[in-house]
Image (cartoon, rainbow, N blue to C red):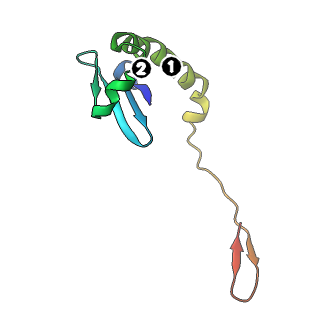
C-alpha cells in the first residue's frame, strides 16, 4: 500500500509506503529518515527493489500529481450536495418470509 495525503489547499501532508505479505506487515517507509523500517525479522530477505529515496521522490511527485488529477476529474461528483435516493420494494415469498429489494 502506498499513497499520499494532501490538504484541502492541495499541499502535501504526508506520504506512506507499507509492504505486507500474506497478512503480515514486512516493512514501511520512514519518511523522516528516508529508510525502510523492517517490521518482521524475516523481511530482510525481500528488501524493496526501490531504494527509499526513489520511493519518496515518487510519492512526493507522481503520487501527488495523480491525486490532484483524480480530484480534478471527480470534482463534480465529489462536491455534490444533493442527497442520494433509493427505492425499496417488498416481495412476499411465503407466510413467514419477505424479500426486500
Question: Which one is in front, 21 or 78?
Answer: 21
Mark 1, secondary structure of its residue: helix
Picture quarter with the C terminus: bottom right
Residue under the point 59% across and 45% down: 82
Measure how far apart labels 1 and 2 are at the Cα level.
Answer: 7 Å
First in sequence, mark 1 or 2: give its number. 2
Quarter where residue 7 is shown: top left
The image position of residue 75, as x and y in percent, is 57, 28
User: In the rendered image, which residue does mark 2 sit on?
Assistant: 10
- Residue count near mark 1 (Cα–Cα under 10 Å), binned few <14, some 14–19, many ≥20: some
Quarter where residue 49 is shown: top left
Picture quarter with the N terminus: top left
- Residue count near mark 2 (Cα–Cα under 10 Å), binned few <14, some 14–19, many ≥20: few
Per the rendering, the mark at residue 68 is 1
Residue under the point 38% across and 41% down: 24
Q: Is residue 85 left or right of residue 31?
A: right
Residue 16, visible in the rendered structure: no
Residue under the point 27% across and 33% down: 41
Q: How many marks?
A: 2
Question: Which one is in front, 59 or 45?
Answer: 45
Question: Which one is in front, 47 or 28?
Answer: 47
Residue 33, visible in the rendered structure: yes
Mark 2, secondary structure of its residue: loop
Extreme-left residue of the structure: 33
User: Is 84 drawn above or below residue 29 in the view shown?
Assistant: below
The image position of residue 76, as x and y in percent, is 60, 30
Amino acid at each position: 500500500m502506498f499513497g499520499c495525503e494532501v490538504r484541502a489547499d492541495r499541499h502535501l501532508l504526508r506520504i506512506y509506503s507499507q509492504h505486507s505479505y500474506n497478512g503480515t506487515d514486512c516493512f514501511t517507509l520512514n519518511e523522516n529518515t528516508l529508510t525502510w523500517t523492517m517490521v518482521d525479522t524475516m523481511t530482510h530477505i525481500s528488501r524493496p527493489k526501490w531504494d527509499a529515496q526513489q520511493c519518496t521522490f515518487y510519492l512526493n511527485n507522481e503520487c501527488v500529481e495523480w491525486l490532484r488529477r483524480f480530484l480534478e476529474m471527480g470534482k463534480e461528483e465529489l462536491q455534490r450536495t444533493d442527497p442520494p435516493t433509493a427505492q425499496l420494494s417488498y416481495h412476499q415469498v411465503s407466510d413467514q418470509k419477505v424479500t426486500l429489494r
